[in-house]
Image: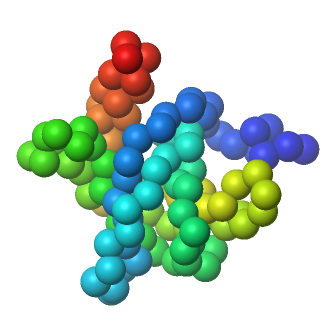
Amino acid sequence: MTDDEKRRHERKTLEVTVDWQELGKEDVIWSATGDVGPGGLKIRTLTPPEEGTRVVVVLGPADQAESLLRVPARVAWVRMDDDFCGMGVAFDPSDDTEGAALEELLKQLLEKQKNT
C-alpha cells in the first residue's frame, strides 16, 4: 500500500512559506510547504524534529499578518533523501472553531495559488 492509499485525506500541491516551531522552544523555523490536505501538511526543511514531536505551524498570506493562523500539529514522519528533505505534520486543532478557520485558510491559499 502506498502512502497516498494510506492517507485519509486528499493532498493538493501547495507551495507557500510556512513557519513552524517545536513546542517549548523559542526558535521559529522558516520553511516551505510541498502539499497540503485537511489533515496535514508536507514541510520542506533541513532540520525536522523527530517523529511524534509536537509543533506549531504558522500559516497564512505573507502580506497579511493579521490573517496568520497558528495551528498545533504533530510530526507524523520525517524523510531525508535525494527526493525530499523534511517532514509531514498532522494538524491537531484545539477546537472546531480553529479547525474551521484552518479549513477556510487552506481553501483560500489553494485558490490564490490556482489564480497566479
Residue 64: x and y in percent read 14, 40
Left or right relative to 105: residue 66:
left
Residue 49: x and y in percent read 55, 77
Q: How many marks?
A: 0
Task: Using the image, determine if residue 50 lies above or below residue 15.
Answer: below
Task: Using the image, determine if residue 67 lies above or below residue 56.
Answer: above
Task: Using the image, determine if residue 96 lies above or below residue 81.
Answer: above
Residue furthest top as drawn: 115
Residue furthest right as drawn: 1
Question: In terms of image quadrants, where is residue 95?
Answer: bottom left
Residue furthest front as drawn: 82
Residue 23: x and y in percent read 36, 79
Residue in the foreground of this view, choosing between 111 and 93: 111
Write the residue at 46% across / 50% down. 32
Left or right relative to 38: residue 28:
left
The colouring scheme, among rainbow, by chain, secondary structure or one colour, is rainbow
Residue in the foreground of this view, choosing between 20 and 2: 20
Question: In terms of image quadrants, where is residue 46?
Answer: bottom right
Residue 112: x and y in percent read 33, 22
Q: What is the quadrant of the N terminus in the image? A: top right
User: Do we see residue 93 in this rendering?
Assistant: no
Q: What is the quadrant of the C terminus in the image? A: top left
Residue furthest left as drawn: 66
Write the residue at 67% across / 67% down. 78
Residue in the foreground of this view, choosing between 51 and 115: 115
Write the residue at 17% across / 39% down. 63
Write the residue at 37% across / 53% down. 18
Left or right relative to 30: residue 101:
left
User: Do we see residue 106 in this rendering?
Assistant: yes
Question: In terms of image quadrants, where is residue 81?
Answer: bottom right
Task: Using the image, determine if residue 36 lies above or below residue 52.
Answer: above
